[in-house]
Amino acid sequence: MRRVIPILSFILLIAIYSQGQSSRTTPASEATDRIVKLYPNPATSYIIFDLQKSFEKGSSIQVYNFLGKKMYETQNVTERITLDLADYTRGVYIYHLRNLAGKIIESGKFQVSR
């Protein structure tokens, strides 16, 4: 009986851990579902946002620095946006793609390196 309890505990722990791992998405499958593709990343002077055909008309993009300050915003986005990074310092920036209701459809990050 003393040996059975630790063995059962170990089996239960393995089962819970493997179930938690199976629900995660892999980066490769996540990249294929993305609406926004951006390049070059890391960027030096500009960054291009390419939106897939499935994005909603009237969507908007906001770019924030790592401290949460809004650096850029555009309404009624087109399929391709080129963002000039002349006023951006070195660091990590976060973008949000929002629908007409203001709900975040997609979020991501990019790096500016100079």
Image (cartoon, grey):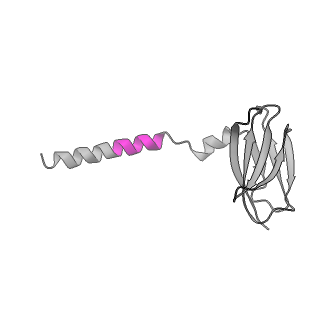
Q: Residue at x 67, y 37 (%)?
A: 33
Q: Is residue 51 magenta?
A: no
Q: Residue at x 79, y 55 (%)?
A: 40
- View extreme (bottom): residue: 114
Question: Along the line of sight, which residue is nearer the eye, 83 or 33?
Answer: 83
Tell me the quarter of the image containing the N terminus.
Answer: top left
Question: Along the line of sight, which residue is nearer the eye, 44 or 87?
Answer: 87
Residue 90 point in image, percent of width and height: 76, 66
Q: Quadrant of residue 57 in the image?
A: top right
Residue 61 point in image, percent of width and height: 79, 44
Q: Quadrant of residue 71 in the image?
A: bottom right
Residue 34 point in image, percent of width and height: 69, 40
Left or right? Give the position of 19 relative to 55.
left
Q: Residue at x 73, y 49 (%)?
A: 95
User: How many badges with numbers are in the image?
Assistant: 0
As displayed, is residue 57 above or below residue 69?
above
Tell me the quarter of the image containing the C terminus.
Answer: bottom right
Left or right? Give the position of 21 relative to 27.
left
Question: What stretch of residues is rendered in magenta?
Answer: 14-22
What secondary structure is the magenta-colored segment mainly? helix
Question: Along the line of sight, which residue is nearer the eye, 58 or 2?
Answer: 58
- View extreme (left): residue: 1
Residue 83 point in image, percent of width and height: 85, 52
Q: Is residue 21 magenta?
A: yes
As displayed, is residue 30 above or below residue 100?
below
Left or right? Give the position of 21 relative to 9.
right
Q: Quadrant of residue 88 in the image?
A: bottom right
